Image (tube, grey):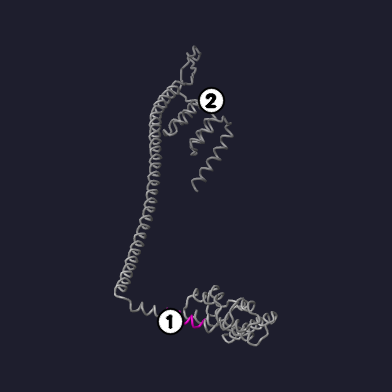
Amino acid sequence: MELERTKQQRMDLQRLIDRSIAHAQNRGITSDEAIKLIKDDIEYGLTEEQIVLYEKKFPKEPDKMAVFSKCLRAGYSEEAIEVITDTRLNAHQMEVAYDFYERRVSLDAIRDIVFKNMPAKRMRELLKEMLMEIEAKNEDMEVAPEYVKELFKEMKESLMALKADNNKYEALSKKLDEIVVYKKELQIQNNLINQMKKEIMEKDSVIAGKDAEIKKLKGEVSDVNVSTKETDVDVKATDKKEEAVIMDNRIPVYYQMQVVDRGIITDRMLIDRSERKISGFNAIISRLCSKRKSRQDIVRLVASGDLNAEQLEQIYVGMESGLTEEQLEQLINNNLTPDRMAKIILIAKSDNQRRQMN
């Protein structure tokens, strides 16, 4: 796998070299030195765009192209390359300028000498003198007086103190950031607490409303109890009245007896044999009244209704069949025929039994 990758890279590099050489030849660059320089720069790693720079500037001067190539390989700035490869210089002057710039002579000094248009030998002498002066100054700095060393020491200490202050400032800034974050978190907590207080107040208000409803219901229950007691009294009074009516409702019965004297009927006597008979209506009312107090409302409905004896009999059958008060009230209030009432009682009884089984 690695071998194939290396082989592919070599093939790509060769294609790049062939393409660059073809472009150079199209510009009229055909010398062996120029072609070799292009090939070497491609292999070194320069781009096609960089190579085009010296091809266009010096298409017929391979020596100057070579100096331009050195500047590119050294990574010089565009300004430095422009001074060193000035078109007014020959290849030797360019070599001198490149050499001294490489030895750290300032670009301004090189520019001053380049613009004087002197031979390469004289340029080298002047640049060499400048280089010697620079080296002498460096040596003087190395043997600087004690006060200069002390000054550098103080400067170093000041820089250290400044760095320490900067660290303190960064620590203070970090602490301030933490305080800001804490304040934000505290604000969020306060908002949550206020929200909880609001919800508690709303719930207290709801509870207070429920308490008022409970008190109202208690009052209604109390009123119902009082009403029930009064109803019990009314029912008891009604029961007594009905019992009195029943007692007073007699059916007269008379027997005629013949008085015979010596085989001859001499007189006829009426003997009162009246008995207290309970009518069908009153009998049913009596049976309804004998039920528990939970049926007293039904009794009141029956007593106040316009039902005949057969309908009342069906009401009694419904009670015996376990119909609910609501179901009995429907039978009483709808004024149904006895036959329909009997069928409805059977249906209601069956439905009630089914509900109990479920």
Q: Is residue 293 above or below residue 36?
A: above
Q: What is the three-letter code of the residue carrying label 1?
A: Met
Asked whether residue 73 is drawn in magenta, I would say: no
Find residue 44 and report its horizontal and vertical position in percent: 57, 83
Quadrant in which residue 200 is drawn: top left
Q: Quadrant of the N terminus?
A: bottom right
Determine the CA span between mark 1 and mark 2. 143 Å
163 or 136, nearer to the observer? 136
17 lies above or below 335: below
User: In the image, which residues are magenta?
Assistant: 123-133
Number of callouts in the render?
2
Which of the marked residues, 1 or 2, is nearer the chain's N terminus?
1
Q: Is residue 127 magenta?
A: yes
Q: Is residue 223 or residue 297 the one in the foreground?
A: 223
Q: Position of residue 164 (x, y in %)?
A: 32, 66
Which is nearer the eye, 140 or 33?
Answer: 140
Q: Amino acid at mark 2?
A: Asp
Magenta part, dominant SS: helix
Where residue 107 appears, x then y in whole percent? 50, 75
Number of other residues with Cα within 10 Å of mark 2, as a class: few under 14, some 14 to 19, many 20 or more: few
Q: Which mark is residue 132?
A: 1
Q: Secondary structure at mark 2?
A: loop
Mark 1 neighbour density, 10 Å: few (under 14) some (14–19) many (20 or more)? few
State the residue position of label 2.
306
339 vs 238: above or below? below
Q: Is residue 278 left or right of residue 160?
A: right
Residue 316 placed where, x, y %? 50, 33
Q: Residue at x 43, y 32 (%)?
A: 290
